[in-house]
Image (spheres, grey):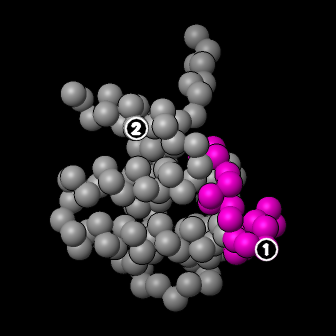
Amino acid sequence: MPRTAELNKGCSTVTTIEEAFSAFLQDLRSELPTSAVANTETVLDMLRHHLNTCDTQADENANFCVQSQPADLIRHLDRFLRYCVMRELVLSFDQQEFVFFVTYDFCGVFLCLTLPAIPIPSA
């Protein structure tokens, strides 16, 4: 079965950001070495922490990732990448680059499959 078909099958059961994180990591575990998956988990933990504590919509129990749909993540990525990663967190350039790569990969591979298709106007 092609990779896209496998991901589409997995995406149909995802209803929260937390489930999207879990499905993404599960997919990576079959392809990457343990050390790369551990680094990816660290990045997703940073994003999870940002969403659960820094967001105005997060309740006092820090359940934003458990209560929100994957599409809700998109409007929070800019603040995470531009403010948290670039200014708040003390990261080397290589670490910042890895955070951007993981976030891009997560959004490109997973979120695009869970969002409705956007029609492209003909010329």
Viewer-closest of 26 and 101:
26
Is 56 included in the stretch rendered in magenta?
A: yes
Q: Taking 28 as reference, is 113 above or below it?
A: above
Label 2 Cα neighbours within 10 Å, binned few <14 / some 14-19 / many ≥20? some
Q: Which residue is mark 1?
A: 60
Give the residue type at disc 1: Glu
Where is the C terminus found, in terms of image quarters? top right
Is 82 included in the stretch rendered in magenta?
A: no
Spot the residue most to the top.
Answer: 122
Q: Taking 5 as reference, is 38 above or below it?
A: below
Left or right of 116? Residue 36 is: left
- By secondary structure, the bulk of the magenta-drawn segment is best described as loop
| Magenta residues (range) | 53-71
Left or right of 39? Residue 115 is: right
Q: Which mark is residue 91?
A: none
Label 2: element kind: helix
Is any atom of residue 104 visible in this view?
Answer: no
The tag earlier along the polypeptide, 2 or 1, is 2
Q: Which x, y percent locates residue 20?
A: 49, 50
Viewer-closest of 20 and 36:
20
Left or right of 112? Residue 42 is: left
Q: Which residue is mark 2?
A: 10
Is any atom of residue 35 visible in this view?
Answer: yes
Where is the N terminus found, in terms of image quarters? top left
Q: Which x, y percent locates residue 68?
A: 67, 52
Query: Residue at image x 42%, y 74%?
Result: 42
Query: Residue at image x 58%, y 19%?
Result: 120
Give the residue type at disc 2: Gly
Query: Residue at image x 80%, y 62%?
Result: 57
Viewer-closest of 113 and 100:
113
Q: Which x, y percent locates residue 85?
A: 56, 75
Spot the residue most to the bottom.
Answer: 90
